[in-house]
Image (cartoon, grey):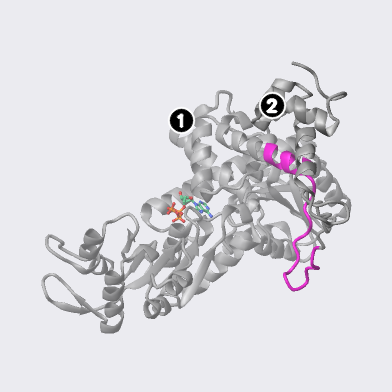
Amino acid sequence: MIRRVDARPIRELMANILVIDDDPIQCRLSEEMLKTHGFEPFIAASGAEGLALLESENIQAVILDLVMPEMDGMTVLSEMRTRNFTQPVIVQTAQPAIENIISAIRLGASDFFSKPIAPERMIISLQNALKRFELENCLRTETHRQKGALSFKDMAAKSPAMKKSIAHGEKAAVTQIPVLIEGEAGTGRDMMARAIHHHAKRGGKPFIALNCSTLDEHELDKMLFGGEGQKKTAFEQAQGGTLYLDEIGALSMELQGKLLALFTGKQLSTSADDHAPLDVRLICATSKRLLNLTKQKQFREDLYYRLNIFPVYMPPLRDRAEDIPDLISHFVTKFSVAEGRRIDGCTPEALIMLTQYEWPGNVRQLENAVYRAILLSEDGHLTPNEFPQIQTSLQGAEKLRSALKSMSPQAAPAHIDAATPQVMPLKPKAQPTKDRFLSDDGRVNNLAQVEKDLIEFALKKHSGKMSAVARALGIGRSTLYRKLKEYGLETDQSNAA
Ligand SMILES: Nc1ncnc2c1ncn2[C@@H]1O[C@H](COP(=O)(O)OP(=O)(O)OP(=O)(O)O)[C@@H](O)[C@H]1O
């Protein structure tokens, strides 16, 4: 069971705060204060250095000194606006003239402090600024989603793996060529497709999405290539824009052939039979490796090479735990607003638990888990108890891990060519059993000797009980007595029972 401690919101625990100040002592003080309160400080000794860090790092808020040589705080503020940095900025200065305060606020500063600053006041100001920033971000993303204008900036991407995917997406956006998005379900393939569309010249034109695995073949055929009752095909609807085909690997061989014919023919035949040149950018997504499907003859190789011109890979969430806090923060804001609940965020234990989980359903599963947790929460904080399924699953995995640990360690696997042959201990060679019909010197025993040995064996086996021995040998008791006398066996081993 995970112990419950304080419940600081994630944004506070993980936020990257940039301090821009030319005074090294003030920088050290700010750094210590931020670390003590669980923030991640980034320090810049000049305005230029600060702007460079804003470009390269994922900064959530800035503490800015106004009086600095070369580039002063006001110039940094206006440069931030010009470059479209929307992070909250808390200004601090040793010269709090009223005109400075007004100018800084006009340039977008969220708060203003005169030095020396009481750390508690600065922390409260940061908390409020971050809360507002998170709300603004969430509102912006959801507005973009509703307007069909999702951009790369709307995607949580702190991890190197996601940064790489977004860099590929940005490159794909400036071209017109087909894109193939590969990744497990729930990794954000749809979001990536929409961002590529939005950033391309076609942004603002239609974006039509179809899922090839959820529609039956007849329906899909009609929607893609037309048929009775279908006023406009998906291609016609997407004309000038983008057609997004999710789970393209599920397309039947017949429909694959039709799609290939479209590529070669480049003509859109409408139901009204007027022909227009095809101007649709195709973005496909798949959770199965298309290359493997081609090897298994389930996907046409010629079509594969047409679609896989610009691949973009969406990494599973388990390979990018750094993105989890931002995603949770976004979902908490989104759903608590939607549900009219005041939820502050996750406790540190819950956050640790959620970053340890494997998330087989990726971001989609995390989104649903946060939504459920918000509905379960009673005191405005999300603790591990609000994620019962994740808790149970991790506890099960922990039990399995400790059971495996207690088992004897296995030998490290070796390549078959390098493995030394295992020498099995040889069983001691069995001694040949003496043939019961042979004497010690190898001659065949005579009949009397065999009969005597047999009677002796039966006497031992039945503990000398005469009636049992006679029954076992198939002779009468009087014959048995006679033979015992004959072979000199009647004394010690026999009894009358
Ligand atoms: N990087 C991200 N930042 C913010 N939200 C994300 C991100 N990736 C995914 N999401 C959200 O997670 C959910 C699932 O994403 P999306 O629909 O794009 O996934 P998918 O790979 O197409 O899978 P599915 O087939 O389940 O829809 C969506 O609500 C999406 O907005």
Type of residue at label 2?
A: Ala
Magenta stretch, overall SS = loop
Q: Nearer the viewer, residue 47 or 58?
A: 58
Q: Is mark 2 within 8 Å of ligand 1?
A: no
Q: Residue furthest bottom?
A: 264
Looking at the rendered image, the quarter that the N terminus falls into is top right
**Horizontal side of residue 174 vs 315, given as left or right:** left
Q: Is residue 410 magenta?
A: yes
Q: Is residue 56 magenta?
A: no
Instruction: Give the residue drawn at x 72%, y 39%.
Output: 403
Can residue 383 be seen here? no
**Horizontal side of residue 394 vs 253, given as left or right:** right
Where residue 23 sits, quadrant-wise, is: bottom right
Vertical side of 177 occupied by 249: above or below: above
* Residue marked by disc 1: 340
Mark number for residue 470?
2
Residue 360 locus on image (x, y percent): 54, 49
Vertical side of 46 occupied by 478: above or below: above
Instruction: Give the residue drawn at x 68%, y 40%.
Output: 400
Q: Which residues are magenta?
A: 399-422
Vertical side of 25 occupied by 349: above or below: above
Secondary element type, mark 2: helix
Secondary element type, mark 1: loop
